[in-house]
Image (cartoon, grey):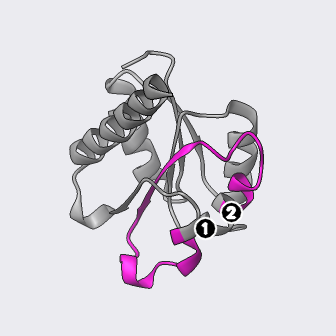
Amino acid sequence: MNPQTTICIVEDEIPIAIMYEYKLMHSGYSVQIAHDGLSGFELLKRCKPDLLLLDIRMPLMTGDEMLEKVRATDWGAAIRCIVLTNISKDEAPQKLRFLNVDRYIVKAHHTPSQVVSIVEEVLARRAQANNNS
């Protein structure tokens, strides 16, 4: 894992965002946090992370609305994205299927350590894809 790897967490529940920030920083990642979709979009535009951990239900702009805006930009089209929410996949907005989401995780079904493992798996696939191109 490259110490330059940046992960953005867009999560409105502050204790949850801080918990994931701690776990990811402890694993050697650089982490930035936003607590709503609007500031999340601005954060992504500013730091252009390697990976986005994104909640769905948030104030000001939902996660799916934010991701749709991100995917419409040159800088955001290729950012890896893991949706991390408590909404079941069946209840999730249908447009997520078309927004290049790498993984869909229900928070209640995964420990923070499992989420870090999934982050590492998604980033490893990204590195492998870059090496093959």
Q: Are marks 2 and 1 in contact (CB under 8 Å)?
A: yes
Q: Which residue is drawn at 66% across and 47% down?
A: 77
Q: Residue at x 68, y 61 (%)?
A: 66
Residue at (44% x, 35% y) in the render: 126
Per the image, label 1 sits on a secondary structure element best described as helix
Residue farthest along the top direction in this orientation: 3
Question: Foreground: 17 or 81?
Answer: 81
Q: Please give the range of residues in magenta.
A: 68-97
Residue 103, given in percent of the width and then of the height, sits at: 38, 56
The amino acid type found where label 2 is placed reads Glu
| Residue nearest the viewer, comparing 9 with 83 | 83
Other residues around mark 2 within 10 Å, as few (<14) / some (14–19) / many (≥20): some
The residue labelled by disc 1 is 64
Question: Does residue 105 lie above or below 46 as drawn?
Answer: below
Q: In the rendered structure, find residue 68 and report the number of the disc placed on it.
A: 2
| Residue positioned most to the bottom | 91
In the rendered image, residue 100 lying in the magenta stretch gets the answer: no
Q: Which of the pair 119/132 is nearer the observer? A: 132
Asked whether 128 or 29 is in front, the reply is 128
